[in-house]
Image: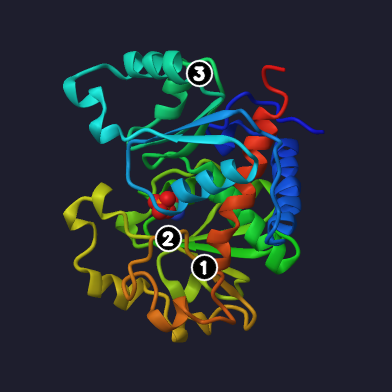
Amino acid sequence: MKHLTQKHLTGIDSLSIEDIETILDLAETYTDKISIPSYSCEILKGRRILSLFFEDSTRTRVSFEMAAKNLGADWINIDLDRSSLTKGESLPDTLHTLEAIVRPDALVVRHHEYGAPQFIARHVNCPVINAGDSWREHPTQALLDALAIRRHKGTIKNLNIAICGDISHSRVAASNILLLSRLGANLRIIAPPALMPAKFPVENIAQFTTMEEGLKNCDIIMTLRLQKERMEQSAIPSEQAYFNEYGLTRERLSFAKPDSLIMHPGPLNRNVEIADDIADDPDRSLILKQVSYGVPVRMAVMDLLLRNQGQ
Ligand code: CP
């Protein structure tokens, strides 16, 4: 049984290339196993995984819960809106209290503040898994995206992959840029100037400000949600104006390879980032398959971090 070199999963930046391959290989195995309806296992039986979501989520929270239950672990949801944090209790005091009561084997954390998972990891004794923090990182999203590409294109190396839209505010883009470049993809970033970061975490990223230029010859087109909650109002003139220039339409898709596939981490703003008919095209859109890979990827991460921990 392989292990990760890290106690926590706080970001792609802290994983070695061997860690990444180990997670993806185990996730492949779990993808096949959970396709059998009667599949169940008890690898993490008796382990307690505490869910701390300080920000809303559908896909990530539910797929972590499914993954924990598929491995036989107990999943414990804390309703933070009804916790004593609302009475002014500090986060470290809340964490120490939860540790004393629950004695968790891992925490799954989503937080709106930059670096919150690392902060929490310094205050608890168990592994912390980042389920998305601010615009910094969403490592399990990038890993499930990589698994989707590997399974549907056979490889990631040398593929032309475009990441399009609100790059500045996207933790999905940040983690994918780190991950896909390390796995050998030729990355292209397409964004309006107001949503293009001044700096990237890796060198020599090809940047485009028009979809038509950036999509040429692409194998994978990853569109992103406009993160209006993190955006200055003036960043885009209107949703319609954004769609007119940056929405993925059938016409724009024709600039990419004829067998190119479309991805989106969700939630979708239909007819803002992506036209309805493209999002729902069964031959080109990976969106629902992509989200389904969240379960095996999160099973692999929890298995690798927890299986031999404390034994
Ligand atoms: N992709 C993603 O993180 O979606 P949720 O916010 O629904 O978890």
Q: Quadrant of the C terminus?
A: top right
Is ligand 1 closer than 8 angstroms to the Cβ of mark 2?
Answer: yes
Q: Amino acid at mark 3?
A: Arg
Q: Which residue lies under the disc numbered 2?
A: 266
Quick check: 201 left or right of 275?
A: right
2 or 3: tag closer to the N-terminus: 3
In front of the other: 216 or 124: 124
* Structural crowding at the residue carrying mark 3, measured as other residues with C-alpha within 10 Å and reported as few (<14), some (14–19) or many (≥20): some
| Rendered view: 231 above or below 302 | below
Q: How far apart, in angstroms, are the residues tagged by discs 2 and 3?
A: 33 Å
Residue 251 position in % (x across, y down): 45, 86
For discs 1 and 3, the disc positioned in front in the rendered view: 3
Q: Secondary structure at mark 2?
A: loop
- Which residue is the site of mark 3? 103
Question: In screen coordinates, is 191 left or right of 300?
Answer: left
Residues marked 1 and 2 touching at CB (< 8 Å): yes
Nearer-the-camera pick, 114 or 68 = 68
